[in-house]
Image (cartoon, rainbow, N blue to C red):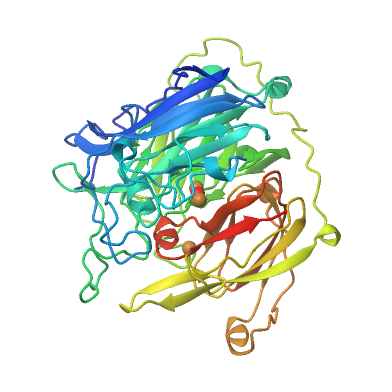
């Protein structure tokens, strides 16, 4: 079944108000529930998971340096919406099937508010995971203004919980941003992009097992999954009516496995102003922008000369990225449509300033140490391929223990054949460079033999990042300072099928 495109309006996700105050600060209640929602004009209602009655969940808007408290409440039924593989770490048969814990992606928070994968809980906290510490999370928002997003992070079922709908945006507003005079109010829109496949009755389809199936394991995890419908803010291929003026779009790739290389059918450029961790130094003008799962981009699109036009937001990233199938232009090659059909209601005084931010570089010479970390493909006891970080599993003992306040360089050595978006909790980092190397030589000798020059990150990656694309046959070097908290945090691949199948490791910041 192919659904008609651009027949539903883009939902503008509401911003949730605090439920009240607690200890003198705003307190939010975010109830995770199961309900039905219309995802496309021609689809019957779909049973989804979401928050406060909406999939995706409402947006939390916080002010920089203003602490807020959030209680993520599990009000889900005890039966999972999607097939749970009980051979996966943390999802064993003795564990409750429906568990949640919410991580604020990109948030600088204490470990007990981070949404650690083993800190899960069930409906009414009847059962909790081994790392569960508290119900109400503290988000200090003492970090640069930017677009974060929240999503379920429960061990072994993150891919299923996020696919079911447990995700939403979280914006940190820095009042100092006002002087930049960017498009705001109704001219600033968050776009959360996810791909989904549906059964004919409108229900969510997620594969029960790979093809060909794995003997004796059903349901079984798949190594990745690409839906053939693209949803933005919970609607399949929506449209947005815009005025002929500049708009700011905060784009989040909340898909399980799919990368997007976005473009505009009008072949005009985006003005990219921000990345994961806030503003770039100056806008980067680009016709294509690549966004891996977990990454965010902040862009301005200027519709002022396009009155009357319909413009499609396109995608041409192969799946899996970068060596997979080319996009099907009639489905996954399109994301949404902008219709420049509205009249200009007021003069557009907004600007795209040349200078947005000052980004102080971190220097290699200040690094306390450099870690060499492989991304490597292995086979599990059922014969399924899976990926490891540093050749270790989630439950292996902790080997990465950065000193609080210290700077480290991590060299990600990708021995596998696809790009892995590597996300590190707590810290923002800078990308130093990427360099091709001889994979076979490394596998034989354990030594890096480079085969070309080191390349600086793309212009639009020269800002603060929390998720970096580690490409196949390349080493990717990042640098970061481990502040401001000590304790246990995860780092992992943000392809959720990889994360759930051992491509995630804890690290511990020590004092
Ligand atoms: Cu967006 Cu640990 O994840
Ligand atoms: Cu991966």
Q: Is residue 78 visible?
A: yes
- The answer to which image quadrant residue 245 occupies is top right
435 above or below 8?
below
Judged left or right of residue 491, residue 404 is right
State the residue lying farthest toward the left: 201
- Residue 431, image x and y in percent? 70, 56
Q: Is residue 305 visible?
A: no
Judged left or right of residue 121, residue 428 is right
Q: How many marks?
A: 0
- Residue 200, image x and y in percent? 14, 46
16 above or below 328?
above
Residue shown at 37% from the left, 62% from the top: 224
Comparing 375 with 21, the one in front is 21
Comparing 125 with 10, the one in front is 125
Comparing 83 with 190, the one in front is 83
- Residue 326, image x and y in percent? 41, 61
Comparing 311 with 489, the one in front is 489
Residue shown at 62% from the left, 47% from the top: 426
State the residue lying farthest toward the right: 365
Residue shown at 21% from the left, 37% from the top: 46
- Residue 471, image x and y in percent? 57, 65
- The answer to which image quadrant residue 235 occupies is top left
State the residue lying farthest toward the bottom: 444
Residue shown at 24% from the left, 65% from the top: 209
């Amino acid at each position: 079944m192919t659904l008609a495109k651009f027949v539903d309006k883009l939902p503008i996700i509401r911003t949730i108000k605090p439920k009240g105050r607690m200890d003198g600060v705003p307190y939010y209640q975010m109830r995770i529930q199961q309900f039905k929602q219309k995802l496309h004009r021609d689809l019957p209602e779909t049973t989804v998971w979401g928050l406060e009655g909406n999939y995706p969940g409402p947006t939390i808007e916080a002010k920089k340096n203003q602490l807020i408290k959030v209680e993520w409440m599990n009000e889900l039924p005890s039966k999972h919406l999607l097939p749970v593989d009980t051979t996966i770490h943390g999802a064993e048969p003795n564990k409750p099937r429906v568990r949640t814990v919410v991580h604020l992606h990109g948030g600088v928070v204490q470990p007990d508010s981070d949404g650690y994968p083993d800190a899960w809980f069930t409906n009414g906290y009847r059962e909790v995971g081994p790392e569960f510490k508290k119900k109400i999370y503290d988000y200090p928002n003492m970090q640069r203004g930017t677009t974060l997003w929240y999503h379920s992070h429960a061990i072994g079922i993150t891919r299923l919980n996020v696919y079911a709908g447990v995700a939403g945006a979280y914006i940190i507003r820095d009042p100092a941003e006002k002087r930049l005079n960017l498009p705001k109010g109704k001219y600033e829109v968050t776009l959360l992009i996810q791909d989904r496949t549906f059964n004919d009755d409108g229900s969510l389809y997620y594969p029960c097992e790979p093809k060909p199936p794995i003997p004796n394991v059903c349901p079984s995890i798949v190594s990745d999954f690409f839906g053939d419908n693209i949803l933005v803010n919970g609607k399949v291929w929506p449209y947005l009516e815009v005025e002929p003026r500049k708009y700011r779009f905060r784009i989040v790739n909340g898909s399980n496995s799919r990368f997007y290389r976005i473009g505009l059918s009008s072949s005009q450029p985006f003005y990219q102003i921000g990345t994961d961790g806030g503003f770039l130094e100056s806008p980067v003008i680009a016709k294509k922008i690549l966004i891996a799962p977990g990454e965010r981009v902040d862009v301005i699109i200027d519709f002022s000369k396009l009155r009357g036009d319909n413009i499609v937001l396109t995608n041409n990233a192969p799946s899996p990225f970068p060596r997979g199938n080319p996009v099907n232009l009639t489905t996954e090659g399109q994301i949404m449509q902008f219709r420049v059909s509205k009249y200009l209601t007021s003069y557009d005084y907004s600007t795209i300033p040349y200078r947005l931010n000052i980004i102080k570089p971190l220097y290699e010479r200040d690094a306390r140490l450099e870690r060499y970390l492989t991304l490597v493909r292995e086979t599990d006891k059922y014969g399924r391929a899976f990926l490891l970080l540093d050749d270790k599993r989630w439950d292996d003992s902790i080997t990465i223990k950065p000193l609080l306040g210290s700077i480290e360089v991590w060299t990600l050595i990708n021995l596998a054949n696809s790009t892995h978006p590597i996300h590190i909790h707590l810290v923002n980092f800078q990308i130093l460079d990427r360099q091709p190397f001889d994979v076979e030589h490394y596998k034989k000798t354990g030594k890096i033999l480079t085969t070309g020059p080191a390349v600086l990150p793309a212009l639009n990656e020269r800002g603060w990042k929390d998720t970096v694309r580690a490409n196949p046959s390349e080493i990717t070097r990042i640098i970061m300072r481990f502040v401001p908290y000590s304790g246990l945090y995860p780092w992992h691949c943000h392809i959720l099928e990889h994360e759930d199948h051992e491509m995630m490791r804890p690290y511990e910041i020590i004092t």
